[in-house]
Amino acid sequence: MQMFIIFLHMPPSIHPTTSKLLDWSRLRTELLWAYEGPPLRPHYHVLENKDTVICWMMLKGSAVVHSQSCGSIQLATGQWLFLPPDKTSHDFSDDASIISLRVVVHWPDGQPLYNHNQWILFEHADYPQLQKLSRRMIHQAQQIVRKSPDPEIEMTRLAGVTCHLTDYLALENATLRWVDYYDRIMQKLGIKRNTIEPMDLRVSTCLRHIEQLPANRKFNETQLAKSQGLSASQLNRIVIQATGNTLKAYADNLRFNDASKQLITTNIPLKELAYLLGFKQQSHFASWFKKRTGLSPKNYRQMQQQKPQHAEMIKALKSW
């Protein structure tokens, strides 16, 4: 079966949705992966379920891509393709050269800004600025990675790279400009934007406070409630109504997400990671993490970082 979603002519744009400034400040944007050149995995046949924006621009050559829910599609030179989360395989031509991006653009609850449950394919000529902004992101990422002691590995783990504030701000600015243009494209293509659920301003304020805390997510519940003119029990009541969790449970979920990300994207020692997450003993961290995943932090890291596809990418980068 072959299914093609191709936007050859621009449909009328829909009126963009608006949200409170406080709500927009909770949108998470982060560049995880960016490069230009030959595909690192030209032939890949494994089901991937990704909750991030993954897109390619075909600079040269062609590709055939498959998805469980969307069938198959062909990508030709001069086209952009945004992939659905359940891509199962892809095969690039021998002469292929691409821009490849993986970007986090979602709300704190994990909901993406746009659902990519279909192939989104369009011509580079329709949105030439996207290539320019993508290359700017790649350039800023390369500026950071080149200063790393092991740039080949860091190219696959951008989140774990150490950098100066100036470099971080330059990459952040490039990423935000890309996300803004990505949003405009999705709007022009008539794709519905997901917005955060409207909630009590007091709840939004408290959740944003917790989201911006360091990885240990420590906060004074009584003082936070007082800042909103409430008691701790009153605040928790309206937070549960809005999110289904208490403030502490919400913070603990974020702490687990931080732990998982650090284990996958960095080589930080487990003892140091336990300290950053607010655990007095590494054993306490291990027990807490195992209750959630069934794996120790060490085994979880080994399972994620030693996947065959990761080794293939490192090997390909070193051969450039």
Image: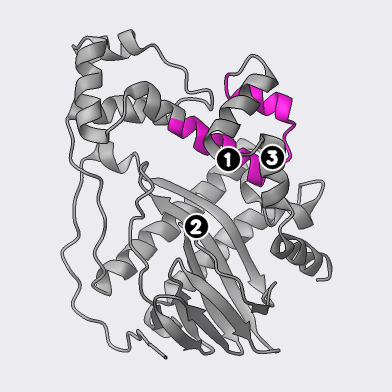
Mark 3 sits on what residue?
162
Mark 1 or mark 2, which is nearer the start of the sequence?
2
Residue 19: x, y in percent?
Answer: 20, 46
Mark 1 sits on what residue?
260
Tag 1: amino acid: Ser
Mark 2 sits on what residue?
103
Closer-to-camera residue (68/184): 68
Residue 116: x, y in percent?
Answer: 37, 67
Residue 259: x, y in percent?
Answer: 58, 35
Nearer the observer: mark 2 or 1; the answer is 1
Q: Which mark is residue 178?
A: none
Mark 1 or mark 3, which is nearer the start of the sequence?
3
Tag 2: amino acid: Val
Q: Quadrant of residue 311?
A: bottom right
Q: In this picture, which residue range is highlighted in magenta?
A: 253-278
Nearer the observer: mark 2 or 3; the answer is 2
* Mark 3 nearby-residue class (10 Å; few <14, some 14–19, many ≥20): some
Residue 260 part of the magenta segment: yes
Q: Please say if 99 is above or below 281.
A: below
- Residue shown at 68% from the left, 74% from the top: 41
Task: Quarter of the image for the N terminus: give it.
Answer: bottom left
* Mark 1 nearby-residue class (10 Å; few <14, some 14–19, many ≥20): some
Nearer the observer: mark 3 or 1; the answer is 1
Tag 3: amino acid: Thr
Decide: marks 2, 1 in contact (CB < 8 A)?
A: no
- Residue shown at 64% from the left, 50% from the top: 158
Instruction: Find the distance from the CA under tag 2 to the CA under tag 1.
Output: 17 Å
Instruction: Find the distance from the CA under tag 3 to the CA under tag 1.
Output: 18 Å
